[in-house]
Amino acid sequence: MKTARPLPNKFQDRPFTVGEAGRAGITSKRLRHRSLTALGRGIRAASPTAELPLSIRVRPFIEVNERCAASHLTAAELLNLPRRRRKGVSEMYDVIRPEGAAHLNRPHVIVHRMKLYDDEVTVLDGIPVTTPERTWLDMAEMLTVDELVAMGDSCVRVPRPELEGRDQPLCALADLQRMIDRHKGKRGLRKAKEAIRLIRVGSDSPQETQLRLAIVRSGLPEPALNVPIFSNDGRRHHEPDLSYEKYRVGIEYEGEHHGDELQIERDIARSECYSALGWTEVRISKRHMLNDGKAAVAKVRSALVQAGWRPGR
């Protein structure tokens, strides 16, 4: 077989549909050349795709199918929501298709046929994707209650514009409740109803959510989340991950990035600030969260008792 004519640059490093190739003037004969890999009917790739960003990999699978949107785990990853990783083959994409639409059977695609309203689909980087609130409800089928709380916390948290380029939450708690009310009888609904009672605005990470849930389930008071400390002169200081203003106790979850040299310097300065303000700092790491967070809870309980808290108060 003769050497194939080079593809236009925009098709050389990403998967593409036969339709868009045809519109760009690529012949059907060229599309049949062995240098291209068929990823299913109507989709081709000139090079491996596994290392490409998800948005690039999934796009052709959405484009070749009418009335479809990325959903479930695929939508959660596109929306950067905390999620459980898919086991096994990574080149699988979740696609939602409205009830009544024709059956769809394609390689690399997990099709979910279910009730879908127009306002439950948004567009992200040109790709139809289920909205954060609908994705949250869909994920109730496969996540634990605690994992669903962590995803819900991520949906409703107020972002930091300087870090994330946006200043509005992905959705509101009321939007999550609207999904529950709208989709009666849906799989996972019981877990969603349990989870929504535990979702709070203010948690910045799944680890902070996990820590909060462990604290509350142990019978300790529910802490505030990322609320700034103010000194007596009204000056604003840092924001503890979790805190009890009444008892002047702040709790900091130390993630892996806290081993960075600059972060260590910041942590030392933060500890000095706690001391100067008359607050107690409780530092929690991953090891404290083993065994349902019992060690973390013990540290928090000890700090609260030393600050005057007693059960039943």
Image: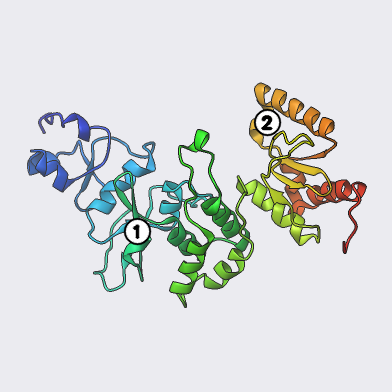
Q: Is residue 37 above or below residue 4?
A: below
Spot occupied by residue 44 in the image (x, y as percentages of width and height) = 22, 44
Residue 13 in the image: x percent, y percent? 27, 33
Q: Is residue 254 left or right of residue 144?
A: right
Q: Is residue 89 left or right of residue 116?
A: right
Three-letter amino acid code of the residue under disc 2: His
Q: Residue at x 68, y 39 (%)?
A: 239
**Amino acid under disc 1:** Val
Q: Can you tell which of label 1 and label 2 is closer to the viewer?
A: 1
Q: Is residue 300 visible?
A: yes
- Taking the spot 87% from the left edge, 64% from the top edge, the residue there is 312
Which part of the image, by quadrant, shows the C terminus? bottom right
Give the camera-side residue of 162 and 73: 162
Determine which of the numbered discs, if any, sits on residue 258 in the image: 2
Residue occupied by mark 1: 121
Name the residue at 25% across, 70% down. 101
Please report whichever mark, 1 or 2, sits nearer to the chain's N-terminal start.
1
**For the residue carrying disc 2, how many other residues have a C-alpha within 10 Å: few (<14), some (14-19), or many (20+)?**
some
Decide: few, some or many residues near mark 1? Use Cα within 10 Å; few <14, some 14-19, many ≥20: many
Residue 230 to residue 120: above or below: above
